[in-house]
Image: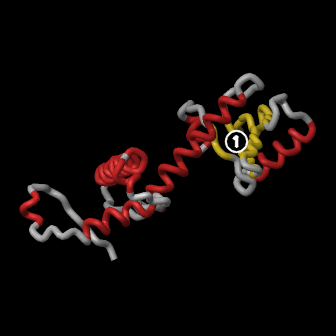
């Protein structure tokens, strides 16, 4: 990914995990034990680390909330320095949030987009666009619908099941009289 960004002259912020770029992680840990290049509390920075013909900054943030400590490590080709490290960590946290609260739900949650639905590139793009629209509509329902709030559902996953349940248990017998176009599928 770093090389793709480099080839396209893109800026990046990636999470650094111990088991992925082990050498970089070890260099960073050694460097900050010797000299932390920022004086911001709970922030750690080591600049210009070289790895496989790439030079980047590595930094970490230690967050403590409700007596729980979480440590975030990042790799970036942005010019991270004392004056902007908080903003760059914030950008990294937002990127992580999008991935984990957005794409992860689409892939592993209700939408189950882990399998290919077609072998055609255009069809795959269209399918994913529909998933994005469905996910957006679902988020609007989850966070803005008075009906959903009135159901007092505690887990997001329950919303879909409640909606499906209400459709299944509907006393409407003649769907043709509804003057609606819709499709209801039940996967087993």
**Residue 132 visible in this rendered orientation of the protein:** no
Rendering quarter of residue 20 = bottom right
Image quarter where the C terminus lies is bottom left
Rendering quarter of residue 144 = top left
95 sits left or right of 57 in the view: left
Give SS at disc 1: strand
Circle 1 sits on which residue?
74
Image quarter where the N terminus lies is top right
**Residue 143 visible in this rendered orientation of the protein:** yes
| Residue 187 in the image, given as x and y percentages of width and height | 32, 73
| Residue 7 in the image, given as x and y percentages of width and height | 56, 35
* Residue furthest top as drawn: 83
The mark tally for this picture is: 1
Report the front residue among 23 and 53. 23
**117 vs 75: above or below:** below
171 sits left or right of 112 in the view: left
**Image point 53% across, 33% down: which residue?**
8
18 sits left or right of 124 in the view: right
**Image point 39% across, 60% down: which residue?**
159
Report the front residue among 64 and 71. 64
């Amino acid at each position: 990914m770093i090389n793709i960004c480099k080839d396209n002259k893109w800026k990046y912020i990636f999470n650094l995990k111990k088991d992925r770029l082990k050498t970089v992680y070890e260099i960073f840990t050694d460097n900050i034990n010797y000299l932390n290049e920022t004086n911001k509390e709970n922030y750690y920075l080591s600049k210009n680390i070289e790895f496989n013909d790439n030079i980047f900054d590595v930094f970490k943030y230690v967050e403590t909330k409700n007596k729980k400590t979480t440590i975030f490590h990042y790799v970036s080709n942005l010019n991270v320095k004392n004056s902007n490290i908080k903003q760059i960590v914030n950008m990294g946290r937002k990127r992580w949030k999008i991935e984990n609260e957005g794409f992860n739900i689409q892939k592993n949650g209700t939408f189950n987009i882990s399998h290919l639905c077609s072998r055609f590139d255009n069809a795959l793009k269209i399918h994913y666009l529909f998933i994005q629209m469905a996910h957006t509509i679902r988020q609007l329902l989850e966070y803005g619908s008075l009906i959903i709030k009135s159901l007092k559902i505690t887990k997001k996953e329950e919303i879909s099941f409640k909606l499906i349940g209400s459709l299944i248990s509907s006393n409407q017998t003649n769907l043709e009289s509804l003057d609606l176009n819709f499709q209801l599928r039940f996967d087993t």
